[in-house]
């Protein structure tokens, strides 16, 4: 490694499925700060996983909640800081959930309603139709600390 | 799209930093089921983010917990099902946190101890030294449902 030169590696991933959602465009999804109470709880949709991965979905339906990692495929342009919707101050992008991140990776927690083959029916969906899914993980107790402090985000 | 042919897209990401941890090899990290109580709470380390991303870290220290998305860079080989450590049944890989996933993406929740420039000191670290970090997000109330059911995982 030459002095001061930072070598970054590239990591390539492929989608394992797509989201089916009633939100057809990013503009259809209200920022959490503007959504009515319970809005996303009522938001249902599907995680349509490609058939070849169906065996990997076994037992997912035993969990009440799953973590979905996806690509912000509509995101164009990277910001290091941004003013969140409804806010006035610039925040570091890693202190926000903005799609305009150095790596456009998204994360959302959904509730499992049921599974039929390679299709998971879920609620709590805040993703646009067609969103490429990269991974699904069970939400466990270790992801869920007892008390949290959420910085600039209003309760 | 030709009949039955599924076109997947490739998504490329680069690391935004590296983990500094006392766990030098994957074998140094006990599976959660085998770790003594509080083991990971006592496990401290650093998220060493590359200098050019330092502005993106502003305000992260206002959150008690951050979500780290990383690459399982030591993972070799993909499984669709696996027997978790200490278990006897094959589980779907998306119902586990195994590193041998179709996309070797990992997720962990850490507690923020402090930040100095582009270095976050954290506890709750269950990652191997040198792990490439792909993204950091604030843990918010929406990631933390009130009650959860965790399938095959023992309490």
Image (spheres, coloured by chain):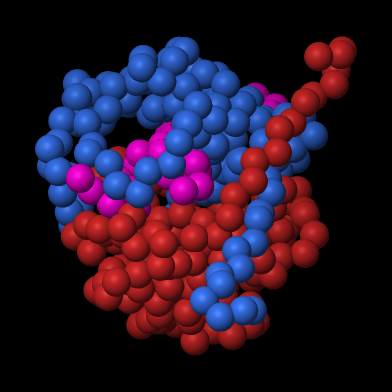
Chain colours: A red, B blue
Residue B93: x and y, percent?
33, 48
Residue B66: x and y, percent?
49, 42
Query: Which quadrant is the N terminus of chain A positioned in?
Result: top right
Range drawn in magenta: B90-119
Query: Which quadrant is the C terminus of chain A positioned in?
Result: bottom left
Number of dots carrying numbers: 0
Report if residue B106 lies within the magenta region. Answer: yes
Q: Nearer the viewer, residue A148 or B143?
A: B143
Q: Residue at x 69, y 70 (%)?
A: A74
Q: Nearer the viewer, residue B9 or B38?
A: B9
Q: Residue at x 47, y 13 (%)?
A: B24
Q: On the rendered structure, is B16 left or right of A113? A: right
Examine the rendering and report whether any part of residue A87 can be seen: no
Q: On the rendered structure, is B19 left or right of B89? A: right
Report if residue A47 lies within the magenta region. Answer: no
Q: Residue at x 64, y 46 (%)?
A: A12
Q: Where A143 sits versus A16, above or below?
A: above
Residue B129: x and y, percent?
52, 18
Most extreme residue toward the front, as rendered? Answer: B3
Residue A64: x and y, percent?
23, 62
Q: Where B26 sits versus B84, above or below?
A: above
Q: Residue at x 54, y 38 (%)?
A: B70
Q: Where B116 sits versus A83, above or below?
A: above
Q: Nearer the viewer, residue A99 or A63?
A: A63
Q: On the rendered structure, is A94 left or right of B32? A: right
Examine the rendering and report whether any part of residue B50 can be seen: yes
Q: Where B70 sits versus A84, above or below?
A: above
Q: On the rendered structure, is B55 left or right of A29? A: right
């Amino acid at each position: 490694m030459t002095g001061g030169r930072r070598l970054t590696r590239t990591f390539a991933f492929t989608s394992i499925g797509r989201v089916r959602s009633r939100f057809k465009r990013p503009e259809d999804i209200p920022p959490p700060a503007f959504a009515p109470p319970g809005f996303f709880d009522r938001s249902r949709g599907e995680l349509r996983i490609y058939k070849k991965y169906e065996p990997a979905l076994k037992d997912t339906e035993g969990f009440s909640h799953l973590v979905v990692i996806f690509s912000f495929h509509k995101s164009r342009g990277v910001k290091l800081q941004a003013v969140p919707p409804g806010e006035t101050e610039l925040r570091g992008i890693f202190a926000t959930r903005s799609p305009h991140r150095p790596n456009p990776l998204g994360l959302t927690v959904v509730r499992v309603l049921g599974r039929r083959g390679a299709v998971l029916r879920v609620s709590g969906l805040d993703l646009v139709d067609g969103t490429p899914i990269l991974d699904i993980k069970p939400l466990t107790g270790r992801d869920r600390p007892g008390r949290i402090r959420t910085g600039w985000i209003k309760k």
